[in-house]
Image (cartoon, helix red, strand yellow):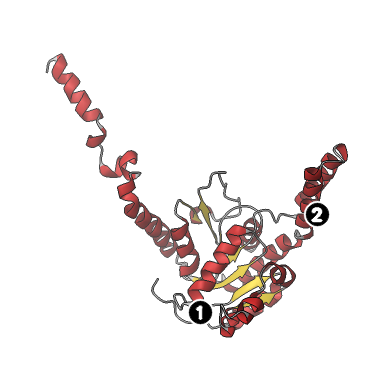
């Protein structure tokens, strides 16, 4: 083979077109491959959970900023120190007020942790993997929930999502049950497909989105019946006036039965234990 022939062969072997399709990242990321990527995100998690014989889950949603009391106290101290240096700065005063509210909610971290410890100890016994705690896998309430299951030496799942500000998994997730998603829709499906209960702690836009997604599916009979527990009645009754929606006629009175408020880990566990979930429907 002469030099020119070798150069042509090298060009052929180095061309992206010569890569195996499964080993060609540029091809897999093409817009036309979106349906394939979505199918892969569905199958990867489904196959892994089946291998681990995980048949049912308890979904825990909640805010990333609801942290343990020591961390919340440190944030408040830092905000107060910064405000003292800028006594006439409204933004600094606002940070103090927000940090005070985060500290007031720090108890939810402890209660989410305790709830998930209890529900894991009650259900993951003798090698059974039922009612496995599943979260978004991030910080805050998600960390607390995974941590509670970890305290019980139980399996626990995290479904991370790629975000502009990269989200790092918390360290309490069972390593082989920590997954990363690109598509929110596929992530939401996996939250709900095996769910036997949803427990929703205080949170912001993401938590509200996940809550209303589940409520809409229940209202339209597109998913299995299950308890949807709004943890922290004082918080939730201020955030959303569900009764007002019913009074205005935009939801049915019966729609108010799709959820209930709870205020202790024990209360949440008792409701889940008593509830008889109807068989899941086909998503």
235 or 139, which lies in front? 235
The location of residue 209, given as percent across then percent down, is 56, 62
Mark 2, secondary structure of its residue: helix
Q: Which residue is at a point 59% across and 53% down the rendered structure image? A: 138
Residue under numbered circle 1: 225
**Residue 16 in the image: above or below residue 277:** above
119 or 142, which lies in front? 142
**193 lies left or right of 104:** left
Q: CA distance from mark 1 to mark 2?
A: 38 Å
Q: Nearer the viewer, mark 1 or mark 2?
A: 2
Q: In which quarter of the view is residue 112 placed?
A: bottom right
- Label 2: how many residues lie within 10 Å, few (<14), some (14-19) or many (20+)? some
Q: Quadrant of the N terminus?
A: top left
**189 lies left or right of 83:** left
Residue under numbered circle 2: 100
**209 lies left or right of 65:** left
Q: Are marks 1 and 2 in contact (CB under 8 Å)?
A: no
Quick one: label 1 or label 2, which is nearer the N terminus? 2
214 or 108, which lies in front? 214
Q: Quadrant of the C terminus?
A: bottom left
The location of residue 278, given as percent across then percent down, is 48, 82
Q: Which residue is at a point 33% across and 55% down the rendered structure image? A: 35
Mark 1, secondary structure of its residue: loop
Q: Which residue is at a point 65% across and 60% down the rendered structure image? A: 203
Q: In which quarter of the view is residue 58 placed?
A: bottom right
**Direction left: furthest residue:** 1
């Amino acid at each position: 083979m002469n030099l020119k022939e070798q150069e042509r062969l090298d060009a052929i072997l180095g061309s992206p077109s010569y890569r195996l399709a499964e080993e060609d990242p540029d091809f897999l990321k093409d817009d036309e491959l979106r349906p394939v990527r979505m199918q892969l995100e569905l199958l990867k998690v489904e196959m892994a959970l089946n291998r681990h014989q995980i048949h049912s889950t308890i979904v825990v949603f909640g805010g990333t900023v609801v942290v343990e009391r020591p961390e919340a106290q440190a944030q408040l101290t830092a905000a107060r120190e910064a405000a003292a240096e800028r006594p006439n700065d409204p933004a600094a005063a606002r940070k103090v007020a927000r940090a005070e509210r985060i500290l007031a909610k720090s108890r939810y971290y402890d209660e989410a942790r305790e709830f998930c410890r209890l529900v894991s100890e009650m259900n993951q016994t003798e090698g059974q993997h039922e009612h496995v705690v599943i979260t978004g896998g991030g910080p805050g309430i998600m960390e607390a929930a995974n941590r509670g299951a970890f305290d019980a030496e139980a399996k626990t799942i995290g479904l991370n999502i790629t975000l502009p500000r990269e989200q790092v998994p918390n360290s309490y997730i069972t390593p082989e049950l920590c997954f990363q998603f690109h598509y929110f829709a596929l992530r939401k499906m996996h939250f709900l497909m095996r769910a036997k209960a949803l427990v929703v702690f205080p949170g912001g836009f993401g938590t509200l989105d996940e809550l209303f997604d589940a409520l809409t599916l229940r209202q339209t009979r597109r998913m299995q019946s299950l308890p949807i527990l709004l943890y922290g009645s004082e918080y939730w009754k201020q955030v959303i006036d569900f009764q007002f929606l019913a009074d205005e006629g935009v939801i049915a009175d019966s729609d108010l039965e799709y959820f209930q408020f709870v205020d202790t880990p024990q209360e949440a566990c008792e409701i889940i234990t008593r509830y008889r979930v109807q068989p899941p429907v086909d998503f």
